[in-house]
Image (spheres, grey):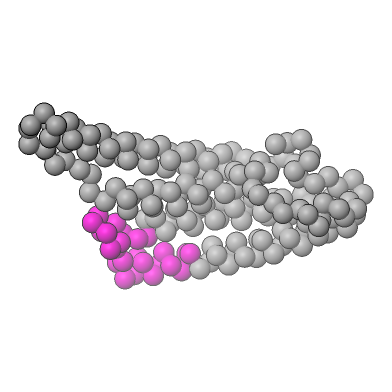
Amino acid sequence: MTYRLDRLYRLGAWGAAACMLAICAIVTFQVLLRCLDALLAAVGSAPLGLEIPGVSEMAAYLLVGATFLSMAYTFTHHAHIRVTLVISRLPPRARVWVETLCLLLTMALSMLLTWELVGLVRESINYEDVSSGLLSIPLWIPQSVLVVGIALMCLALIETLIGTLRIAFTAPASYVAPETDGDS
């Protein structure tokens, strides 16, 4: 299946990659600072005591961002884990309708999650919520990344649903499961 919004999904994947690189950079820098302190202590010097405050907090927010921003790209490239034990044994005509039902359910849950996350962001802005860690990050910032990621996933699900419905109504016997269509 060809996705018209693939560039948007790729942008989300690049955002996820940037989050992972940022995690790697801050954790590596923190480790290097600790190694420097250990080296200074080993040679009899006083440790500098340099550290990056809130590393674990930043890494946690970045990891959640990477997870959510990559969902649509991962989905459109058929890299999500799918349990197809039952539906893989169905004939194409039945499978296309079961796939449609699964897409509808997933889309409904994703849209509900998007709606609730938007409400959470509004609430965080209204109450000026900040994280309880060392950095006191305004919570609407990491929450907004969640909204973007799940909204991208909703778009990917809508595109997939439209394509699946097109096949279901025009040529259900020609349906080929996403994991076997050769796009991966």
Q: How many marks?
A: 0
- The single residue placed furthest to the top in the displayed view is 43
- Say left or right for 24 vs 167: left
Q: Position of residue 110 (x, y in %)?
A: 60, 61
Q: Position of residue 158 (x, y in %)?
A: 68, 55
- Say left or right for 54 vs 123: left
Magenta stretch: includes residue 34? no
- Say left or right for 78 vs 63: right
Q: Position of residue 101 (x, y in %)?
A: 77, 62
Q: Quadrant of the C terminus?
A: top right
- Residue sitting nearer the eye, 12 or 45: 45
The magenta segment: 117-140
Q: Quadrant of the N terminus?
A: top right
- Residue sitting nearer the eye, 154 or 18: 18
Q: Is residue 81 visible?
A: yes
Looking at the image, residue 33 lies above or below residue 72: above
Q: Residue at x 37, y 42 (%)?
A: 23
Q: Residue at x 59, y 63 (%)?
A: 111
Dividing the picture into quarters, in which one does residue 70 lie?
Answer: top right
Magenta stretch: includes residue 120? yes
Q: Position of residue 68 (x, y in %)?
A: 51, 51
Q: Residue at x 38, y 52 (%)?
A: 60
Q: Is residue 168 visible?
A: no
Q: Residue at x 62, y 40 (%)?
A: 6
